[in-house]
Amino acid sequence: IILSSPNIHAKKRIYSNSSAAVEIWSYHQTTSEASPETRSLFIDSKLRTTTSATAVAHAEAFIHPALLSHTHPKNVAVFSDTPLLLLKEILKYKSVERITLIDVDLEALDAALKYMPDLNDCSAIRTETASCLDSAQVEIIKGGLDTWLENLDAEHEEDYDYDIYDILFMDVASASQKEQYLSELYHKDHFDYLIDAEAMIVVNVGSMPSIHGDDVTDQDSRTDFFKMISTDSSCYGSAIVYEEPLAAPLDTTFIS
């Protein structure tokens, strides 16, 4: 839908992996080729990140409200297949000492680093390195979410020391991620012991339903998640829903 828009001109696919699950397209948003080029990365035909202002608005809305609200965030985790712009916004906070990136699509990450290098450019906000990923605070967990959780579960059962996170950022993109990130079972079995009473969870959950009733099925997971955190038995406190229209066509609705 995005690439078929009449506002997209001179589009060209510049990267595709062997299965065509990860693609990067370049295009102009005016008919003038002198206009800035936009590059967008898609995973399974879903827009995940872009070099336009859209992705910056999405990242800012996702990251800043929680980091500004927390009294002293030191340890944060980002669950995202494409975390570069989210990481860049987090690195603007000097109090953050550790950033764990989980469930990263490594193939998409490599493609973004090669064809969209500005997403990883922290030269304006860091002094020790121009690469956001090379910052000392950053750790990429390899092996996926389930492997990481299995290791943490083992530590939890053995009473080993494990990290308590101040903020969990959950970038929900696919149906499988909705099942993992937003389900009550996952939160009770895994996420609850990773946070304390001061912690915050931020989730992007699609966009607000339109007045025409579009994408009704896409709202089910958000509704169920909101009900879960609002019940009397929930370990979570108050929840805030907020919207950033400038993030469209990326997700524009967030729960914190």
Image: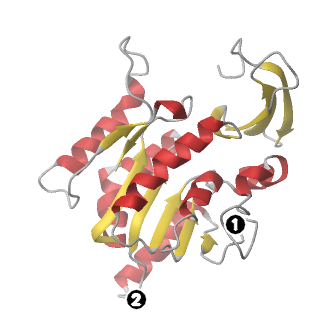
Q: Residues within 10 Å of mark 2 (few under 14, many from 20)?
A: few
Nearer-the-camera pick, 44 or 158: 44
The residue pinned by badge 2 equals: 160
Name the image quarter holding residue 11.
Answer: top right
The quarter of the rendered structure image containing the N terminus is: top right
Task: Look at label 1 and name its amino acid.
Answer: Leu
In the picture provided, is 141 more to the left or to the right than 69? right
Indicate left or right for 233 with 30 as reference.
left
Q: Position of residue 231 (x, y in %)?
A: 15, 49
Query: Which element is circle 2 on?
Result: loop
What is the distance, in whole Å, between disc 1 and disc 2 at their CAs? 28 Å
Question: Residue 166, position in %: x, y?
Answer: 38, 70
Q: Is residue 149 visible to us here?
A: no
In the displayed structure image, the side of residue 208 where residue 148 appears, left or right: right
Which element is circle 1 on? loop
In this image, 253 relative to 14: left or right?
left
Residue under label 1, please give it: 133
Residue drawn at x 69%, y 64% as measured from the top left: 132
The amino acid on which the numbered mark 2 sits, given as a three-letter code, is Tyr
Q: Residues within 10 Å of mark 1 (few under 14, many from 20)?
A: many
Image colouring: secondary structure
- Which residue corresponds to the image point at 78% horizontal and 40% vertical from the top-left? 19
Q: Earlier in the sequence, mark 1 or mark 2?
A: 1
Query: In the displayed structure, would residue 82 be above or below residue 13?
Result: below
